[in-house]
Image (cartoon, rainbow, N blue to C red):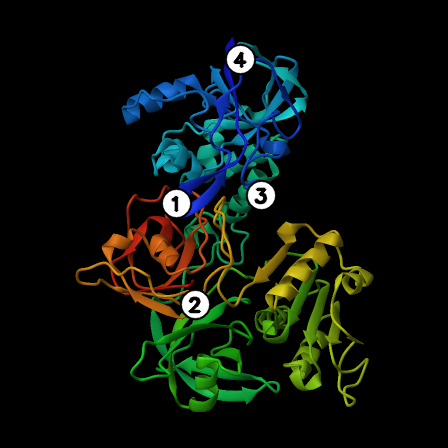
Amino acid sequence: MATLTSVNVGLPKDVAWRGATVRTGIWKRPVTGPVTARRLNLDGDGQGDLAGHGGEQRAVLVYQLDSYRHWQQHMKRDDFVPGQFGENFTVDGLADDEVCIGDRYRIGDAVFEVTQPRVTCYRVGLRLGEPQMAALLVSHHRPGFYMRVLTEGRVRAGDEIAKIASGPEAMTVAQTDALLYLPGHPRPELERALRVPALSPGWQTSFRALLADADGGSQAGGSQARGGNSGLTNTAPPPAWPGFRPQEIVGIEPESASIFSLTLASADREPLPAALPGQYLGIRMRPDPQGPPVIRNYSLSGRPGAQTYRISVKQEPHGVASTYLHQHMKVGDILDVAAPRGTFLLKNADTPVLLLSAGIGVTPVLAMLQALAAQPSPRPIWWLHAARDGENHPFAEEVRTLLARLPAGRSFVSYSTPRDTDRPGVDYTFAGRFDLGRISGLKPPQDADAYICGPDAFMTDMTEALKACGLSASRIHTEIFGAVSAVNPGVVTGPAPAPHQPARVPGGRPGPSVSFARTGLTTPWHPEYGTLLELAEACDVPVRWSCRTGVCHTCETALVTGGVDYSPDPVEPPAQGSALICCSTPTADVVLDL
């Protein structure tokens, strides 16, 4: 019979790491005497990052003495102590290749149920002094696992562990972990995992995404077409061409007081590859002939599948790129254009569709409306757009024409400050702004898929309003024009400085240039920077990461042009046209969508 050999707890504390401060509960220490296991935690225990650890589904982390022995031999170390791997329960027995998701155990007075493998995280490597530990746990099939507390009660070191129920499907922790993180993802195994009710909701969502790819149900073409791991991150179809290609401006049209559209055709007049509704183009230009190029992303606003591309640009008062395009570009001029990219894509489904936008955020959802009207789709389709007034309401007539083709189309337009000449009931639905009260009063269908684009505050408010109306977070999709929001789990941060050149420039000959497209920054590469992620951090470019070892794909970033080498090799390669910046270095000039 398995035995609980140590109960370990620890409250979050601040730890110095790589010039930053990390708040983490990874430092666990053995407890003498009984401890009460409660629904969310053990008494005296805590987590620094509740987004990835803790909570009902991850109340207790378990790790095995046999794995301790394995790592002692593999790492040639003899300094491990109970709690070294951040676990609450150090156990003799309960191997990852024997314990199954849904198994139930009685320990002391409490009853537990196995819910998922350990989440990959850099902090276990921080605790062990081994940066590659997150990848090693997966590749060696020794992740450990979480349990939830079914019956609260006291436990203590020395308690026997009695199995009282077996999980359906007999799917082990090691099998479940490999199914998500390692290449393959066979459809029968995904279906098998999803038949286990005890599997935590987060892992269920990941397996459903992988199953959709295995079924070929994604409009983007399925995982075979694009690679990557849709269970870990949104994946997009591979770009139609690498780098930038010349395209000619064949049309310029004003759309509102501050927005204009450019229509682009292939410079050689060959048909352009079809874009998907919601994608964007990267445009490279050189406003200052003596300065570095400027790269900006602009959503496609035209009909998907057309032989030309249409982008729509808001002229900002001091915008370098928008001013250059508006004042200097004319029909017949050539622009360097990267292939359509993006994961903000209209799903191929039968559910209702909510398209919400404000200002220039109208562009990607307009392309979605174009695609729906071209069918025409029988789905209930709601168009919600916020503008200042009629003069600043782009595509108003075009949208009315498209909605007229849809048998179940509805329109709600708000003007925050309508003019006397703006017609209520014709030009706009109501004066004011969209807010929780306005959205809830419309009673949007709870089974709808919502697509939101606009200023950050608008997207945040609309997301919260739709959640309050009963839409699940998985059905709400947003598109960000500027820099992505950072994901730096556990790192204690203050006000974010503006992106800048690295404070320290290593000596020696510089390598390829690295351009961060969304922040407009280009800097030469030096091997001393370490990885592309570490260079971005040195420049205070907002980045997303978690494992830092090529496992979790949180750092996966569109690679607009250039190539990279990996060290270590990722557990599963990223999608085509993307890079895992946490473990890669440039082999040529690169442009990253950051």
- Labelled pair 3, 2 in contact (Cβ < 8 Å): no
C-alpha distance separating marks 2 and 4? 53 Å
The mark that comes first in sequence, 4 or 3, is 4
**Closer to us: 370 or 68:** 68
Residue 158: horizontal and vertical position, in percent?
Answer: 53, 9
Residue hosting label 1: 548
Q: Horizontal placement of 202 versus 384: left or right?
A: left
Q: Which mark is residue 157?
A: 4
- Labelled pair 3, 1 in contact (Cβ < 8 Å): no
| Residue 140 visible in image | yes
Label 1 Cα neighbours within 10 Å, binned few <14 / some 14-19 / many ≥20: many
Q: Residue at x 77, y 90 (%)?
A: 421
Residue 472: horizontal and vertical position, in percent?
Answer: 68, 50
The mark that comes first in sequence, 2 or 1, is 2
Q: Which mark is residue 205?
A: 3
Q: Horizontal placement of 415 versus 215: left or right?
A: right
Give SS at disc 2.
Answer: loop
The mark that comes first in sequence, 2 or 4, is 4
Q: Residue at x 55, y 35 (%)?
A: 47
Give SS at disc 3.
Answer: helix
Residue 130: horizontal and vertical position, in percent?
Answer: 34, 35
Label 4 Cα neighbours within 10 Å, binned few <14 / some 14-19 / many ≥20: many
Tell me the amino acid under the disc marked 3: Thr
